[in-house]
Amino acid sequence: MKRLACTATFLTLSACCNLHAQKPPLLPESDVSRLASEISGETAKRNLEGIARFHRQRGSKGFHEAADLVAERLRAYGLSDVAILQFPADGRIFYGTQRSRPAWDADFAELWEIASGRSRSASEDQRGQMPMTREPGARAVTMSHDTMIASYEAEPVILAEDSESANVTAELVDIGSGAKEADYAGKLIKGKLVLTSAQPGAVGDLAVGKFGAAGIISYAQNQKTAWSGENQAAVRWGHLDTFSPNKTFAFMVSLETAHAFQSRLARGEKITLRAVVKAGAHPGNYEVVTAAIPGSDPQWNDDEIAFSCHLDHQRPGANDNASGCATILEVARTLEKLINSKQLAPPARTIRFLFPPEIEGTMALLNGKPEFAKRIKAVIHMDMVGGGPETKAVFHVTRGPMSLPSFVHAVAWAFADWLNVQSYQFAATGNAAYPMVAPEGGKEPLRAESTAYTMGSDHDVYQDSSFAIPAIYLNDWPDRFIHTNFDSAANIDPTKLKRAAFIGAASAYYIAGLTLERAKLFQDQVDAGWFASRFVRAWGYAGLPEREVENISLQQKSAGMATAYSLKKFVHDPEAHESRDAFRQKLAREEQPRGQGALRFKRKPEPKGPPTVFGYDYFGEHVRSAGIPAPRLLDFEGRWGSGEEYAYEVANFVDGNRNAQEIRDAVSAEYGPVPLELVVEYLEALEKIGLIELRN
C-alpha cells in the first residue's frame, strides 16, 4: 500500500505539472525566451565537426589539438579564465585513487594479409611498412594479391589503445574468447597472431604473457544493445591493459572480417598477416580545458556551478563525446553573449566549464587542484547528448545516487519535462510556443526520461562521497554506433544539441542565481513528496518480503527529506540543521542492531575518489596485494543493480554515523535486497586496504 501511495503522489504531481506545462518552469519567461532564441544547434554541430576530426587519446597530440580548438573557441566567445591545465601522467603519480596512465600516441599502423608463399623484402624490414613499388636492391614481389585489412591513417579505431610498436609477420590462430586457459588447449600459439572475441586487455596476459602470442586481432563487441552485431562492417574501439607487464599490440576488426577469417581457418586454410605498428606510451600530461563566467554576488564568491564533459575519444567519437563538448561550448557562448549584452542578469555564482579526459582527467583536477572541488557546488555533466534518429538513442536526465540526494535533479527535470511537452505538441500539431527546433535539425519530440542513477562517466567521480558534489547527468542510451567507426557527425541532430543545451543552460543559470528567497519559492512548487517519488522503481516490488517493502518506503521518504535539506543547505538557510535532524530521525530504528550490523566505519580523508576508476582498479590491486579474497558483493546481482553499483554506494554511505545494517538497508532500497554479510565483507575489505576505518 505504501508503494501505491507513492505512485499516486507521483501521478498527481505529474498531472499538476502538465496543467501548467505551457508556462516555462522556474525562470521568468523572458529569460527562457532569450535562451531558446540564442542557442544554436547548428553552431554546436559545427564545433562538433571540428572536434571529431581528432583522434583524442589521453595525453596525445590529437587530444592537445582538440583542447587547443576548444580553448580558442572559448576565448573567441569572450569567456574569462580560459586555460589548459596540465597534470603530469607517467604511470607512477596518483591522483587520489587514480593511478595516472602515461600519455599514448600512435603514428602508424597497418594490417595486411600476405599472399600465400610471399616473403618480405629487405626494404620492407628497413622501412617497417609495405612497399608499393620495387626499389633498387629489393627482391621482386607481386603486390596484387596482398590485401590491406586495416589502416590507422584511414580509421584510427583499428588500433587498440596502449598498443606498442611492432613489425610482425605471422599465422593467424582462432582462440575464441581467449579469456581462460581452456581456450588455448591443443593450439600452437607461440609466435602467432591470435583472433579473439574478447577485448585485447582481457586476453593479453594469457595469450601473450603465458602462451607467447606475437599480437592480438580482436572483434570484441562491447557496449551491447539490441542492435549489436546488426552492422557487420562496424569496427569497435579496443583497449589493452595500460599497466600489464606483457606489452603488445592489438588490431580491431569488424565482425564481417572476423567471420571471414574464421570460415577460412575452419576449412584448414593458412592465413598469414603482416602487422606494422609505430606507437607507444610515454610520460605526458592530462590536459583539462577550463573557462568561466564570473559570479556577481560577493556572498557567493566561493561557489561555482560547473559544466563537465569528456573531450577524449577515438576519432570520430561524434556522439561520444564530441556532442557533450560542443553542447557545453554552445552553452558558454550563449550565456556569455546574453549576459554581456545585458539580456540576462549576471549569475550570482560563477559558472565554470571543464573539458577533461574522461574520469581520469576529472580525478586529476579534483585531487591535483583541490580548490576546484571545494568551490564546485553542483555539476551539469553531458556525455552523449546529440544522437539523431539513426542512433536509436533515448535521452536521459539521470538522477544522482541515493547516497547524495539533491534538489538539482529536480531543476533539470523541470526543464526537461516542460520541453518534452513543448516538443511533442510541436511534433503532433506543428504549433508550440517553444518547439526548440534547429533549422537543420529534426522535428521529433524530445521524450526525455527521468532515470535512476547509472554509472559510467565523470558524474561518478563528482558524486563519490569524498567529493559529494551533486551532478545532473544528461546522456543518450542506447546508441547503436557507440565506440565504433560509425559514430560520426552525420548521425548528430542539431535539434537534439539545441535542446540539450537549453536544459543545461537553463538549469545552470537557475541554480547559479538561487537565493534564500528564490529557494523558498522553489520549495513551494516542488515538495519532499515529489523528491521521494523520484526514487520509486517503476517496475514495482512484487514478491519482496514485507520488511523490505517497508524499508524501501522509509528510505524513499528519507531521500525526499534529504533532498529538501540539500536546497536549504545550498542557500545557507538557518533551518537547514533542523531539516537534517528531522530526516535522520526518520531512519532511527526501534531496536539497534547487534554484532556485524552494529559496526560503524568512516571514510578516511585520503585517498579521494571511487574505489575503482578508469583504466585502473585501485580496490582490486590493493585487495590482491593484501591477499584478501575478492568480496562476493562484486559479483552480486540484485533486483535493480549489479555488484559494481552496490559497491559504489556501500562506500558512499560510509559516513561515520550509519552502521552496517543501515548501509545494507540503504543500498537494498536502491538496488534490491542484499545479504548483510556481503555488505560487511566488502566494508571490511575497504578497511583492510585503508580507504575506511572502524569508528570507535
Image: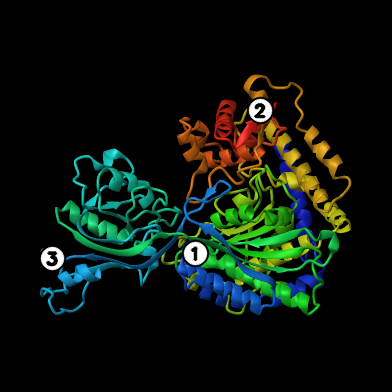
Tag shown at residue 481: none
Upstream in the sequence, badge 1 or badge 2? Answer: 1
User: What amino acid type is highlighted by mark number 2?
Assistant: Gln
Tag shown at residue 391: 1
Alpha-carbon span between mark 1 and mark 2: 43 Å
Q: Nearer the viewer, residue 421 or 478?
A: 478
Circle 1 packing at 10 Å, graded few (<14), some (14-19), many (20+), is: many
User: What amino acid type is highlighted by mark number 1?
Assistant: Thr
- Residue at point 14%, 53% (across, down): 268
Query: Against 611, is 678 above or below?
Result: above
Q: Nearer the viewer, residue 594 or 289?
A: 289
Alpha-carbon span between mark 2 and mark 3: 68 Å
Q: Position of residue 561 (x, y in %)?
A: 78, 42
Tags 2 and 3 in contact by the CB under 8 Å rule? Answer: no
Q: Position of residue 578 (x, y in %)?
A: 86, 40
- Residue at point 46%, 35% (across, down): 625
**Element under label 1?**
helix
Which of labels 1 and 2 is toward the front? Answer: 2
Alpha-carbon span between mark 1 and mark 3: 44 Å
Residue 184 found in image quarter: top left
Circle 2 packing at 10 Å, graded few (<14), some (14-19), many (20+), is: many
- Report the side of 469 relative to 480 (left or right): right
Query: Against 668, is 422 above or below?
Result: below
**Element under label 3?**
loop
The quadrant in which the C terminus is found is top right
Tag shown at residue 661: 2
Upstream in the sequence, badge 1 or badge 3? Answer: 3
Please name the residue that numbered disc 3 is placed on.
119
User: What amino acid type is highlighted by mark number 3?
Assistant: Ser
Q: Residue furthest top?
A: 595
- Report the side of 108 relative to 192 (left or right): right
- Whether residue 499 appears in this view of the structure is no
